[in-house]
Image (tube, helix red, strand yellow):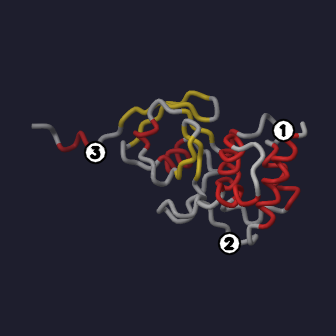
Amino acid sequence: MSDSRESHSRAEISFVVNGESKTTRAYPMERLLDVLRHQLQLTGAKEGCGEGECGSCAVLMDGALVNSCLVPVLQAQGSNIVTIEGLATGETLHALQEAFLECGGAQCGICTPGMILAAVHLLNRKPEPTVDEIREGLSGNLCRCTGYSQIIEAVADAARRRTHA
């Protein structure tokens, strides 16, 4: 018979975050969001709802857009994770980050990291999306400040920049 404490003990979990190998000790069912924010000090992903409904905690995990509040950290073992902090190259912002700033897509900042990562995910799959495709690509992310027009404009602007670069 196994000791019931085994299921409640911390495990060593390794993954790549923003291009850097990381190993941490966490409870297997601890949320990836909490490990990123509290252990790795990557505070870009925000807790909005804690139920996977708002997208504020979105990250890319092995290229898929996931709500980190719903992912047990054990599920991230061996994966490649990109957070908002991993998009810029040194002091050079990612094209989507620049477009959000220029178009006023970033207001209070709670939804912005998740919106930008959802847009990255979208543009990786559809480099020249229509407005309807942008809306669909961002549909898992809630914003309470902008009314979405500036966000959609920012994604469309970043897509134009990429195709004309």
In the picture, measured across the screen, residue 94 lies left or right of residue 164, that is left
Q: Residue at x 63, y 66 (%)?
A: 142
Q: Which residue is mark 3?
A: 8
Mark 2 vs mark 3, foreground winner is: 2
Q: Secondary structure at mark 2?
A: loop
Quadrant containing the C terminus in the rendered view? top right
- The answer for how far apart the CA atoms under marks 2 and 1 are is 28 Å
Indicate which label's residue lies in the foreground, 1 or 3: 1
Q: In the rendered structure, which amino acid carries the disc numbered 2?
A: Arg
Residue 125 on image: x %, y %: 67, 42
Q: Which residue is mark 1?
A: 92
Disc 2 designates what residue? 144
Among the two numbered marks 1 and 3 on one chain, the one whose residue lies closer to the N terminus: 3
Callout 3, which amino acid? Answer: His
Relative to 15, 43 lies left or right: right
The first of marks 2 and 3 along the sequence is 3
Q: CA distance from mark 1 to mark 3?
A: 42 Å
Instruction: Give the quadrant of the N terminus.
Output: top left
Marks 2/3: CA distance?
A: 38 Å
Q: Residues at badges 1 and 3 in contact (C-beta under 8 Å)?
A: no
